[in-house]
């Protein structure tokens, strides 16, 4: 059992509770940094894809997990970020300028959409974001001179200071670039959540009535959260475009929005770590199913691939099992396990029974 004797409030406002957590993060970053030296190209590509999904998951986590707003159209903001960044690079802008501008433009677009949309909540807000997705999809087709229309666009190679970050020629460099961007966004996200703005997000999520009583402008707070969320998602979309190499509007389908919701839900709502755990599950489970399918075909002689939709059914079954039996997600399960060991032998089986939902002080909903 860890016992922390506090003599000041410095540790309470620190980004890390103690040096143990800071050291664990440094070890993880070091491991991720040296991964290209011993991982094969296939696994390195999957790790890059997982980091991009984690970045997109953090964008949606800010909206769903930390502000309590539901979005079914975040794939639209992935598309806006990807098309904006590639369009700027095609007219000669360097990546170091086009990339942040794409994120800023996506964030401003999301904030403008949010001004009327955030006055709604629940299923109505979800339908409004779905309508935005449909509108953006049609705009991509109509703006053919910029977006390539149905034909799509080729993402140009990234070059910084003469160093290439091409997806196929220099995968290790692209991986390090994505890792650096994800680390910086994660650091900024963690600091945001311990600032007054981040705490206002949590207040609005837990109880809008209580937040208004504390003097928080709920509409402005939700619009700001929507803008920041879409901005981070736009950055993920720009990286996704370079990772894929060629894309059109079909890449950013409604299924991408659903997968993003699964990332934050299964990973653990209300935690940055949950975005990473959910991204790992979303990207790893299909690959594990494919490996099992090949093994069963080669060893047992059972051709699972001949059954249409079986892979999707297995994947959906795994996700449903997580939602039913562990509503707090993967990170919630980790917290339960860690707390059980810390409190052993005083831990009780029903100690987490009251943590199935956020605090709701309003009774009119």
Image (cartoon, rainbow, N blue to C red):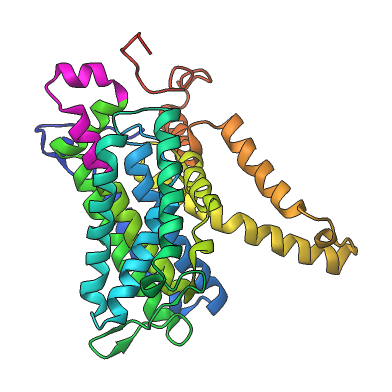
Location of residue 297 with respect to 259 vertically, above or below:
below
Q: In this orientation, which residue lies closer to the viewer: 256 or 14? A: 256
Q: Is residue 333 visible?
A: no
In the shown orientation, is residue 325 left or right of residue 306? left
Q: Residue furthest top?
A: 363
Expressed as whole percent of the image width and height from the top left, the position of residue 254 reads 52, 50
User: Which residue is drawn at the image coordinates 29% and 29% (left, top)?
Assistant: 119
Location of residue 108 with respect to 220 vertically, above or below:
below
In the shown orientation, is residue 222 left or right of residue 121? left
Q: What is the count of numbered marks?
A: 0
The quarter of the rendered structure image containing the C terminus is top left
Q: In this orientation, which residue lies closer to the viewer: 91 or 326? A: 91
Indicate whether residue 209 is drawn in magenta.
Answer: yes
Q: Main secondary structure of the magenta part?
A: helix
Expressed as whole percent of the image width and height from the top left, the position of residue 59 reads 34, 49
User: Which residue is drawn at the image coordinates 32% and 81% (left, top)?
Assistant: 90
Q: In this orientation, which residue lies closer to the viewer: 359 or 155? A: 155
In the shown orientation, is residue 205 left or right of residue 244? left
| Region rendered in magenta | 206-226
Expressed as whole percent of the image width and height from the top left, the position of residue 336 reads 46, 32
User: Which residue is drawn at the image coordinates 26% and 77% (left, top)?
Assistant: 95
Q: Is residue 232 visible?
A: yes
User: Which residue is drawn at the image coordinates 24% and 26% (left, top)?
Assistant: 203
Q: Quadrant of residue 242?
A: bottom left
Indicate whether residue 269 is drawn in magenta.
Answer: no
Q: Quadrant of residue 70?
A: top left
Q: Residue furthest front?
A: 142
Q: Residue furthest bottom?
A: 162
Q: In this orientation, which residue lies closer to the viewer: 229 or 152? A: 152
Q: Quadrant of residue 113?
A: top left
The quarter of the rendered structure image containing the N terminus is top left
């Amino acid at each position: 059992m860890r016992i922390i004797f506090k003599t000041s409030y410095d540790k309470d406002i620190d980004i890390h509770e103690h040096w143990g957590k800071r050291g664990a993060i440094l070890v993880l970053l070091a491991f991720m940094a040296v991964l290209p030296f011993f991982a094969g190209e296939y696994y390195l590509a999957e790790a890059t894809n997982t980091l991009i999904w984690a970045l997109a998951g953090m964008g949606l986590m800010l909206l769903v997990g930390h502000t309590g707003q539901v979005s079914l159209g975040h794939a639209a903001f992935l598309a806006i970020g990807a098309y904006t960044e590639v369009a700027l690079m095609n007219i000669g802008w360097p990546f170091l300028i086009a990339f942040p501008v794409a994120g800023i433009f996506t964030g401003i677009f999301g904030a403008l959409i949010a001004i009327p949309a955030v006055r709604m909540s629940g299923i109505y807000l979800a339908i409004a974001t779905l309508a935005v997705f449909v509108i953006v999809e049609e705009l991509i087709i109509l703006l053919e001179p910029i977006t390539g229309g149905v034909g799509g666009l080729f993402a140009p190679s990234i070059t910084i200071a003469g160093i290439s970050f091409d997806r196929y020629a220099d995968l290790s460099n692209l991986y390090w670039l994505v890792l650096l961007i994800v680390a910086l966004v994660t650091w900024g996200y963690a600091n945001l959540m311990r600032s007054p703005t981040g705490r206002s997000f949590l207040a609005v999520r837990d109880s809008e009535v209580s937040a208004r009583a504390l003097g928080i402008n709920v509409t402005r707070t939700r619009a700001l959260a929507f803008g920041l969320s879409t901005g981070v998602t736009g950055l993920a979309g720009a990286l996704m475009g370079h990772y894929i190499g060629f894309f059109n509007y079909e890449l950013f389908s409604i299924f991408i929005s659903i997968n993003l919701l699964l990332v934050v839900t299964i990973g653990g709502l209300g935690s940055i770590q949950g975005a990473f755990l959910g991204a790992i599950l979303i990207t790893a489970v299909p690959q594990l199913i494919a490996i099992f399918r090949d093994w069963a075909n080669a060893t047992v002689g059972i051709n699972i691939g001949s059954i249409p939709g079986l892979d999707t059914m297995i994947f959906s079954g795994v996700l449903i099992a997580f939602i039913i039996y562990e509503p707090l997600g993967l990170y919630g399960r980790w917290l339960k396990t860690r707390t059980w060991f810390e409190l052993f032998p005083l831990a009780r089986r029903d100690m987490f029974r009251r943590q199935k939902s956020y605090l709701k002080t309003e009774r009119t909903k």
